[in-house]
Image (spheres, rainbow, N blue to C red):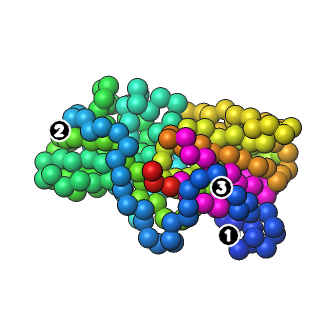
Amino acid sequence: MRRENVLLPSALIAAGMLSLAACSGTTPEEGVPVPVEPISDPQDTVATRVETDGTGNCNFDASPADLSLAALNDSDYGEGFMCGACIEVVGPNQKPVVARVVDRCYSCAAEQVGLSKHVFDQVGASDFLQTTLRWRYVTCPVTGPVQYRFKEDSNPYWAAIQVRNHLLPIQKLEWMKDGAWTDIPRTSYNYFVQPGMGAGPIRVRVTASDGQQLEDTLPEVLSATLIPGAAQFGMK
């Protein structure tokens, strides 16, 4: 079992390190999911059932309490730009179901999607390995602020940061270097990787797919550590 460090908001505030500035957005009430809204047009496709526990190319943790999961075909997955985004699918029983993107679907043709067994059950396709359905991207029903995770082996000389718990797909992550915002290169395994960031604190700015931005200060670079941000993206 992988051990994970988590810096709680109270500890960060006590240390005076948690940024309270956000360019846009609000923090949803803890435990109350944000309502889901469409952010793309619907399209008809074929869905393939895939085996997933929440891990995969997007490098999220296993999520046994949340098995409404999706995987994207090679074209839509690209360089991991939609990792952590959410899709809404409507299958044979016409019941809309929201699934979170966690992986690449290697067996899916262009424009197809992979869905977990749990989602197949929810859309009324329990007995099938494939089914036709309609899907679209939607906002994620998150609670609380965005989160930042330092990958294992992150250190002052090499750091990898993942953005989690985001309402909208993530467009880019920047850090303040020598007084200017500088892009952190993104990898297909859903981490932004930058050498030589130092021990911290590190000012970061995350941009959503619709251009909204949030700023946070990460107190220090700590391997396998999850840090809560100050706010969440807002609905427009």
Residue 108 vertical position relative to residue 230 in the rendered view, above or below: above
Identify residue for label 1.
8
Which numbered circle lies on residue 22? 3
Which of the two marks, 3 or 2, is nearer to us in this view?
3
Give how far apart the Cα atoms at labels 3 and 2 are. 41 Å
Where is residue 45 drawn, in percent x and y?
23, 34
Instruction: Give the side of residue 196 with respect to residue 24, left or right.
Output: right
Q: Dot 2 lies on which element?
A: strand
Query: Residue 205 in magenta?
Result: no
Image quadrant where residue 32 sits: bottom left
Image point (79%, 58%), residue name: 219
**Could you give the CA–CA distance between mark 3 and mark 1, rounded to whole angstroms?**
19 Å
List x then y, in percent, for residue 19. Answer: 73, 60
Which segment did they paint magenta? 211-233
Alpha-carbon span between mark 2 and mark 1: 43 Å
The mark that comes first in sequence, 3 or 1, is 1
Q: Which amino acid type is shown beneath numbered disc 1?
A: Leu
Disc with the residue nearer the chain's start (3 vs 2):
3
Amino acid on which disc 2 is placed: Thr
Of circles 3 and 1, the one toward us is 3
Q: Residue at x 52, y 30 (%)?
A: 79
Q: The N terminus appears in which quarter of the rendering?
A: bottom right
Is residue 51 visible to the viewer in this orientation of the structure?
A: no
The vertical placement of 62 against 75, above or below, is: below
Q: Earlier in the sequence, mark 2 or mark 1?
A: 1
The numbered disc on residue 132 is 2
Residue situated in front as seen by the camera: 144 or 222: 144
* Pick the front one: 35 or 93: 35
| Residue 204 visible in the snapshot | yes
Q: Is residue 61 left or right of residue 110?
A: right
